[in-house]
């Protein structure tokens, strides 16, 4: 009894770092956006009076279908906005759990309104199951999120949470492989009794098969196709045990990713199978290993010499901003230096003086180049994984002129802006 | 263990058990449990696929393809149930122009999206008329390949149905 309890505890209840779920949040948010957003580009075709609409009574209760079908046009538009705001909010991790729930609810609304595009593939169900689990807790907002910046916890990346959500997502992908293979050779599946791969390769151009490199070579070799088909079934069947066993886990993740990539290259199947399956497979990596790897990098960077960021310690806004930067600094690369407590600034850079440092923030790169103000923040983005997406904005054409102007405005209004930053950052 | 932690763990355990039961029940329901018990079983609504995870589980040697034509110069021939539409010209319509929603990283038309639409004849005809108001009507053809590997050249091409636009019925039949 005790051993069963221990196993159960280790499987679902034990607390482990939630950083993998935080990364998975980004992947699943993008997948949902890629799936739902295209249907919103042609509202008249998909959701309004002239739309080609189907409903799915095998999936939704009839009462709900009837209610949603009565939606006037403004309600549909309202849900478009709700989806747009909530999905972006979920992507950046702002009010992570609430935005996830709202995004899923709005996606369900569009699915109920018209199942023709959204509900026509199994990949949508795969996504919904994963999204449902993500709605249950806020663990996915622990890192790589606005939430973690607002909470001000410097070591948010290694926050520990009950493991059950990640475990159920792991099992979701594992069992999907198992059931997919099971159906291929039992029930009505014909992958052992016939040669489905051979047929797929011989589909006419209107079919689902893409014109990939080896297609012509393989399409007249039924024996080879049969062997490959059997291999696919065997690999899918073994995927769960291969993922469970530690020694084969990494190979299974590679194999599964390669399998999904091959699917993407050869067949016109929904890209969710690639966009979601691969991140789901990566959830099998033990988060403790991820944290150990990060800690190793942090220790190395601390010993190798961190990069100084010179700031004004008497400025409350600057201190809070520094806190945010340190939360984003996953690899502990940046070393904040308060110029007011520093005896000799010239040891960091010969041009640096207290007068200059009182005017704006300075950042010194490993090659000794000094960056100030907006340019300091722009260069910092290269070193902070959470700030990588900001590079797109920071290096957008025209930002070289606009950026310093914005920086000057923020610097002038810092006392006012300080009030809007949460006190947790103090 | 603190009581709050005990309550939390109990809740998590209860959820995990319910989830796993529902997950495997819905994965096995249609193809294993229902044939075994010989009766339809209730489903868990709004989450799991009704037929389980059956991706590409059965692929046969035959293949079906839909073609949609816009027709011009339509004339009605015959009477009653034998009535057919004759026309002076027809144009094959690209299915990407019928359903304009583009999917990311794959072609939903090649995935067979239109097969789900043609079965709903009235609705599909109305939609075609909305998309292509300049045609007198439409002809939906079904091309069947009985065996793609043994006789790839053999194709059975038949008209699934024809439909006239409401504008043509109003103005064209005089």
Image (cartoon, coloured by chain):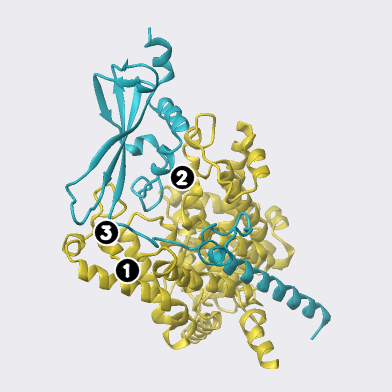
State whether discs 2 and 3 lie on one chain: yes
Q: Chain of mark 1?
A: A
Q: Mark 2 vs mark 3: which is more N-terminal?
A: 2
* Picture residue at 37% right of the left edge, 60% below the top: B58
Q: Which residue is mark 3?
A: A199
Looking at the picture, tell me which residue is in the foreground, A215 or A92.
Answer: A215
Q: Nearer the viewer, mark 1 or mark 2?
A: 1
Spot occupied by residue B8 in the image (x, y as percentages of width and height):
76, 75
Rendering colour (chain A): yellow
**Which label sits on residue A193?**
1
Spot occupied by residue B34 in the image (x, y as percentages of width and height):
56, 63
State whether discs 3 and 1 lie on one chain: yes
Q: Which residue is mark 2?
A: A38
* Picture residue at 34% right of the left edge, 67% below the top: A191
Circle 2 sits in a helix, a strand or a loop, which is it? helix
Mark 1 Cα within 10 Å, few/some/many (few <14, many 20+)?
A: few
CA distance for labels 2 and 3: 31 Å
Of all residues, the one furthest to the bottom in this rendering is A2
- Answer yes or no: is residue A382 visible: no
Q: Quadrant of the C terminus of chain A?
A: bottom right
Is A58 situated above or below A321?
Answer: above
Q: Nearer the viewer, mark 2 or mark 3?
A: 3
Spot occupied by residue B152 in the image (x, y as percentages of width and height):
19, 51
Q: Mark 3 vs mark 1: which is more N-terminal?
A: 1
User: Chain coloured cyan: which letter?
Assistant: B
Circle 3 sits in a helix, a strand or a loop, which is it? helix
Is A76 situated above or below A157?
Answer: above
Of all residues, the one furthest to the right in this rendering is B3
* Picture residue at 42% right of the left edge, 81% below the top: A250
Spot occupied by residue A119 in the image (x, y as percentages of width and height):
51, 49
Q: Mark 1 vs mark 2: which is more N-terminal?
A: 2
Q: Quadrant of the N terminus of chain A?
A: bottom right
């Amino acid at each position: 009894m005790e051993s069963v309890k221990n196993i159960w505890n280790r499987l679902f209840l034990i607390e482990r770092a939630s950083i993998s779920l935080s990364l998975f949040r980004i992947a699943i948010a993008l997948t949902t956006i890629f799936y739902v957003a295209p249907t919103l580009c042609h509202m008249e075709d998909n959701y309004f009076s002239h739309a080609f609409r189907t409903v799915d009574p095998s999936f939704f209760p009839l009462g709900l279908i009837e209610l949603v079908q009565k939606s006037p046009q403004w309600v549909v538009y309202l849900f478009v906005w709700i989806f747009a705001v909530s999905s972006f909010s979920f992507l950046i991790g702002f009010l992570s759990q609430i935005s996830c729930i709202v995004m899923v609810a709005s996606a369900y609304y569009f699915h109920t309104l018209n199942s023709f595009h959204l509900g026509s593939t199994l990949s949508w169900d795969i996504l919904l199951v994963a999204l449902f689990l993500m709605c249950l807790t806020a663990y996915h907002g622990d890192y790589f999120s606005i939430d973690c910046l607002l909470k001000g916890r410097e070591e948010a990346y290694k926050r520990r949470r009950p493991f059950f959500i990640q475990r159920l997502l792991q099992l979701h992908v594992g069992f999907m492989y198992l059931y997919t293979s099971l159906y291929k050779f039992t029930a009505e599946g014909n992958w052992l009794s016939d040669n489905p791969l051979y047929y797929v390769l011989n589909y006419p151009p209107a079919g689902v098969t893409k014109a990939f490199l080896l297609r012509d070579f393989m399409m007249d070799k039924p024996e080879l196709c049969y062997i490959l088909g059997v291999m696919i079934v065997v690999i899918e069947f073994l995927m769960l045990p291969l993922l469970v066993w530690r020694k084969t886990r990494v190979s299974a993740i590679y194999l599964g990713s390669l399998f999904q990539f091959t699917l993407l290259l050869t067949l016109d199947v929904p890209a969710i199978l690639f966009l979601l399956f691969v991140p789901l497979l990566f959830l099998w990596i033990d988060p403790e290993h991820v944290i150990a790897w990060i800690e190793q990098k942090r220790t190395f960077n601390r010993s190798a010499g961190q990069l100084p960021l010179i700031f004004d310690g008497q400025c409350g806004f600057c201190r809070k901003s520094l806190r945010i930067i340190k939360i984003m600094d996953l690899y502990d690369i940046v070393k904040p230096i308060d110029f007011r407590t520093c005896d000799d600034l010239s040891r960091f850079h010969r041009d640096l003086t207290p007068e200059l440092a009182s005017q704006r923030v300075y950042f010194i790169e490993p090659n000794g180049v000094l960056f100030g103000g907006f340019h300091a923040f722009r260069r910092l983005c290269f070193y902070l994984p959470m700030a990588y997406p900001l590079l797109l904005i920071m290096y957008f054409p025209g930002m070289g002129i606009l950026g310093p102007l914005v920086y000057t405005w923020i610097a002038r209004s810092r006392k006012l802006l300080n009030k809007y930053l949460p006190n947790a950052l103090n | 263990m603190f009581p709050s932690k005990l309550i939390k763990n109990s809740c998590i355990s209860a959820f995990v058990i319910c989830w796993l039961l529902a997950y495997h029940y819905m994965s096995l329901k249609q193809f294993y449990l229902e044939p075994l018990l010989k009766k339809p079983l209730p489903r868990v609504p709004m989450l799991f696929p009704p037929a389980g995870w059956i991706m590409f589980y059965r692929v046969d040697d035959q293949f079906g393809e839909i073609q949609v034509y816009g027709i011009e110069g339509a004339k009605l021939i015959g009477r009653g149930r034998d009535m057919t539409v004759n026309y002076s010209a027809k144009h094959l319509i690209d299915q990407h122009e019928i359903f304009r929603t583009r999917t990311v990283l794959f072609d939903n038309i090649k995935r067979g999206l239109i097969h789900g639409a043609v079965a709903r004849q009235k609705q599909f005809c109305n939609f075609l008329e909305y998309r292509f108001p300049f045609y007198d009507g439409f002809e939906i053809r079904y091309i069947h390949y009985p065996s793609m590997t043994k006789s790839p050249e053999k194709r059975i091409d038949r008209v699934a149905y024809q439909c006239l636009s409401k504008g043509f019925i109003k103005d064209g039949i005089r």
